[in-house]
Amino acid sequence: MKVGYQRVSTQQQELARQTRAFDEMGITKIFTDKASGKNAEREQLKAMLNYIREDDVVVVESISRIARNTKDLLSIIDTITAKGADFVSLKECIDTSTPQGKFMLTVFGAMAELERECILQRTREGIAIAKEQHKYKGKPKMKINEEAFRKECKKWREGLQTARETMQRLEVKPNTFYRRVNELGL
């Protein structure tokens, strides 16, 4: 059985490109995470790894969707192969059922990690220069409809919904939620 795994980093990002690739291959069992790939502690990744069986093939649109560093990538692939399954990355044309595919997986995994590290380094350097020039003011505050925020917080304070439900309805992360609660005196 072919099993798809897809991931985007945030709730706002789209899965259309990855989903289309799976549709074209006729993959119907798909596990989806909307979380950063910087570590392997992702709910649906774990579920997929528990689900696969011998002779299954785990398919991803690209290596960066399953892991962002070589160590995690190789660990995930070890788990997949220990279950007797294979791994295929469509973008990089990698198939671990072949020796060449196993070799290329390691090379592309290292390249994905290098790319991520370079992006982080450039970002840090750019922020440092902007700070020196007094142009950097930090990440802009997320625009939140204050009326809707107050309405949902009222439900939370009255015990009609949990804080987690309130955050989900408002589509905010916990740090943003609690900061805004404090700023608005709720």
Image (tube, rainbow, N blue to C red):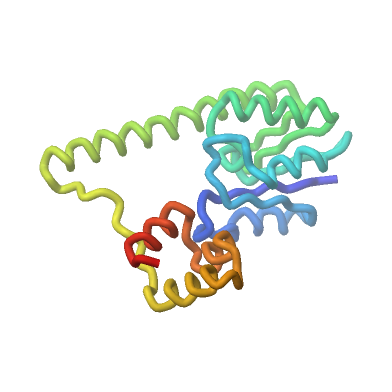
Which of the pair 139/98 is nearer the observer? 139
Going 62% across and 38% down the picture, which residue do you hit? Answer: 41
Left/right of residue 28 with respect to residue 68 in the rendered view:
right
Vertical order, 183 against 116 (above or below): below
Vertical order, 7 against 39 (above or below): below
List x then y, in percent, for residue 97.
78, 29
Q: Residue furthest front?
A: 158
Left/right of residue 132 with respect to residue 176 in the rendered view:
left
Going 66% across and 39% down the picture, which residue do you hit? Answer: 89
List x then y, in percent, for residue 181.
40, 62
Q: Quadrant of the C terminus?
A: bottom left
Going 87% across and 37% down the picture, which residue do you hit? Answer: 53
* Image quadrant where residue 177 sits: bottom left
List x then y, in percent, for residue 46.
72, 40
Vertical order, 27 against 112 (above or below): below
* Image quadrant where residue 156 sits: bottom right
Left/right of residue 83 with respect to residue 95 in the rendered view:
right
Q: Quadrant of the N terminus?
A: top right
List x then y, in percent, for residue 74.
65, 25
Going 55% across and 63% down the picture, which residue do you hit? Answer: 168
Count of numbered tags: 0
Which of the pair 179/10 is nearer the observer? 179
Vertical order, 172 against 144 (above or below): above
Left/right of residue 136 with respect to residue 44 in the rendered view:
left
* Image quadrant where residue 17 sits: bottom right
Q: Residue furthest left?
A: 133
Which of the pair 28/52 is nearer the observer? 52
Which of the pair 107/116 is nearer the observer? 116
